[in-house]
Image (cartoon, rainbow, N blue to C red):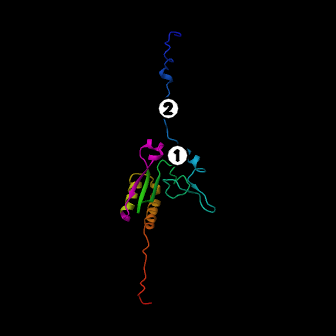
Amino acid sequence: LAQGRLASGPPKASPRFLFVAVKMPAASDLIWECVKANNSFIRKSPNMPVMSAEAGNLCGLNSYKFSGLANAKAFDVKCVKTGSKETIVMTTSNKKSSRAQKPGSRLIQAGVKKQTKKGLAQIAKATEGSFYRRDLIELAQKKYQKVKTSLKKKKVVVKSRRAGK
């Protein structure tokens, strides 16, 4: 017993000195300044713009506007192959802010219809309708069209040997 205290443990801290650690997400500008020059997704080639292979990057360019790492709201349209089936997928950020700190559940992938009218409407609803990255709606619709045309396969034409020359 020292100075009237029990030897069971240290004295209790008064409530006015109690600090609570709160996890705050980092500002997207700060994240961009950290990753714009050096990250594992950058692809550099001579006489070409600096490209990026990160998930959620709509144009594949290494810029703040399209970055899936730095932006709180990432957006992408791409083709995913599962087995012999190819599908068009739209990637967005999770609406819950707590998921921003978890890389595995940060991005959500949703399928997009292959019928042109319905697919474009689905992309417009996801961007313009819900006020989510309205600056990228035209680029997303153009990329959807390009992905859709890339899915078309050329038909193999076999010439008949018996046909007259």
Q: Is residue 104 magenta?
A: yes
Sequence-first disc among 2 and 1? 2
Disc nearest the viewer among 2 and 1: 2
Q: Residue at label 2?
A: 21
Q: Residue furthest right?
A: 46
Position of 106 with respect to 61 (left or right) is left
Picture residue at 49% right of the left edge, 38% below the top: 24
Pointer 2 local density, CA inside 10 Å: few below 14, some 14–19, many at least 20: few
Q: Residue at label 1?
A: 28
Task: Residue 81: give its label.
Answer: none
Q: Is residue 65 magenta?
A: no
Helix, strand or loop at label 1? It is helix
Kindly identify the amino acid type of the residue bearing the numbered disc 2: Ala
Q: Quadrant of the rendered structure where residue 154 is?
A: bottom left
Estimate the x, y position of residue 55 in percent, counting from the top left: 49, 53
Q: Which residues are magenta?
A: 93-117
Look at the numbered discs 2 and 1 and tell me whether their residues touch, using CB distance below 8 Å. Answer: no
Q: Residue furthest front?
A: 161
- Compared with residue 88, is residue 11 higher up or lower down, i.e. above or below? above
Picture residue at 47% right of the left edge, 44% below the top: 100
Picture residue at 57% right of the left edge, 48% below the top: 35
Q: Residue furthest bottom?
A: 164
Dividing the image into 4 quarters, which one contains the C terminus? Answer: bottom left
The answer to which of 73 and 128 lies nearer the viewer is 73
